[in-house]
Image: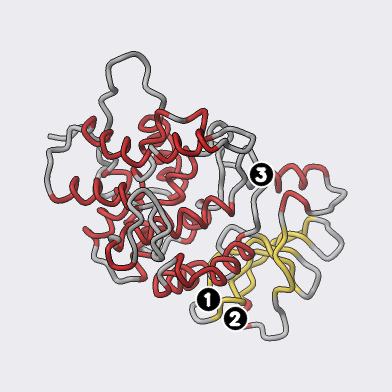
């Protein structure tokens, strides 16, 4: 039997925040730097991945918005849950069945596991040298070897995860690494993970650069799509996130600012928004939910970085800045 986390009772419906917190904690355990000569015995992440799949299939809006968060210690511990959530959401749009979604989620959760030996280098705050970049790229092959440290027996699932780890940095035009595969040579799960990996990486800050707002990341990805991403999969990502993904902040033509709650299918520029700040930069007396899909005279004028919103309310400023970070609930 594979070592894994204890499953939750079937009668419980987990909260998105609890599942996300568990995923961050599990990423810390799996991606920790090995100490000593003996390799660690790693827990197979299937239970956590199944919870994520259950929430995504159930249409839980919060789990998708949590994928906009970062963690304060090492970026990889937030990156892994975020990529898993986004990959599963794209897989749902591709009409994958539950077990295929679980396998896709496992591939996503473990796609960078070879970085466990290069955590300091991965978070280097300055530009990598050519030699350092070459070393970092070796994490792909190392990740395939790390799979041996999980007690799950060899079989179809582990073989798929091993293959996808090896292909998740390939590009459809053959300019990826390590094998320079192209087109249909690349596993469809690897194409999904490569795409959402790029989105998550750019839309979250890193030690060497600030984040790019999600709508700008998506715009760039659309421009780069030929040769870099599978066009059908990119459309599924856009359908899932719209141009204003859940958890991001937008300014309305009324001057008010709100947090995106969910997307409206077929209306990528008109999400459902939770209005929090008035046109003068003050906290509204009563936050309200607004469905822009049903309000033709109200619309988004631009996306905003919530950490840069100008307001005289010091407490509100702190609350907005805290929204970028995952902090375990007390």
Residue 220, position in %: x, y? Answer: 59, 66
Q: Which residue is mark 3?
A: 209
Q: Residue at horizontal 43%, vertical 60%? A: 60
Residue 53, position in %: x, y? Answer: 33, 56
Residue 93 visible from this viewpoint: yes
Disc 1 and disc 2: Cα gap in Å? Answer: 7 Å
Label number found at residue 116? none
Q: Secondary structure beneath disc 3? A: loop
Disc 3 and disc 1: Cα gap in Å? Answer: 32 Å
Q: Secondary structure beneath disc 2? A: helix
N-terminal label among 3 and 2: 3
Which quadrant of the figure has residue 253?
bottom right
Q: Residue at horizontal 46%, vertical 38%? A: 134
N-terminal label among 3 and 1: 3
Which quadrant of the figure has residue 158?
top left
Q: Which residue is nearer to you in this view: 222 or 179?
A: 179
Asked if 296 appears above or below 273 in the picture, the reply is: below
- Position of 34 with respect to 245 (left or right) is left
All told, the count of numbered labels is 3
Asked if 73 appears above or below 19 in the picture, the reply is: above
Q: Which residue is mark 1?
A: 264
Asked if 137 appears above or below 291 in the picture, the reply is: above
Residue 78, position in %: x, y? Answer: 49, 42
Q: Residue at horizontal 45%, vertical 40%? A: 21
Disc 3 and disc 2: Cα gap in Å? Answer: 35 Å
Q: Which residue is mark 2?
A: 293
């Amino acid at each position: 039997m594979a070592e894994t986390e204890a499953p939750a009772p079937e009668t419980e419906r987990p909260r998105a925040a609890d599942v996300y917190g568990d995923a961050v904690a599990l990423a810390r355990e799996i991606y920790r730097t090995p100490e000593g000569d003996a390799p660690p015995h790693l827990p197979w992440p299937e239970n956590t991945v199944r919870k994520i799949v259950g929430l995504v299939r159930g249409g839980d809006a919060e789990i998708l918005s949590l994928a906009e968060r970062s963690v304060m210690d090492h970026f990889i511990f937030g990156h892994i849950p975020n990529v898993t959530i986004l990959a599963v959401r794209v897989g749902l749009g591709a009409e994958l069945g539950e077990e295929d979604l679980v396998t896709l989620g496992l591939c996503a959760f473990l796609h960078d596991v070879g970085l466990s030996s290069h955590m300091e280098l991965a978070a280097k705050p300055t530009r990598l040298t050519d030699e350092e970049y070459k070393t970092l790229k070796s994490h792909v092959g190392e990740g395939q070897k790390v799979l041996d440290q999980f007690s799950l027996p060899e079989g179809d699932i582990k073989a798929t995860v091993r293959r996808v780890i090896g292909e998740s940095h390939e590009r459809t035009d053959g300019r990826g690494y390590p094998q320079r595969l192209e087109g249909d040579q690349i596993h469809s799960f690897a194409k999904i993970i490569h795409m959402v990996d790029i989105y998550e990486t750019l839309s979250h800050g890193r030690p060497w650069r600030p984040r790019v707002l999600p709508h700008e990341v998506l715009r760039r990805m659309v421009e780069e799509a030929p040769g870099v991403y599978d066009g059908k999969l990119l459309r599924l990502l856009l359908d899932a996130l719209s141009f204003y993904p859940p958890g991001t902040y937008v300014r309305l033509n009324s001057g008010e600012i709100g947090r995106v709650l969910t997307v409206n299918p077929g209306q990528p520029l008109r999400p459902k928004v939770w209005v929090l700040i008035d046109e003068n930069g003050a906290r509204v007396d009563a936050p309200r939910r607004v469905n822009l899909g049903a309000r033709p005279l109200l619309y988004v004028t631009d996306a905003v970085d919530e950490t840069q919103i100008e307001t005289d309310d010091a407490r509100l400023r702190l609350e907005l800045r805290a929204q970028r970070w995952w902090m375990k609930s007390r």
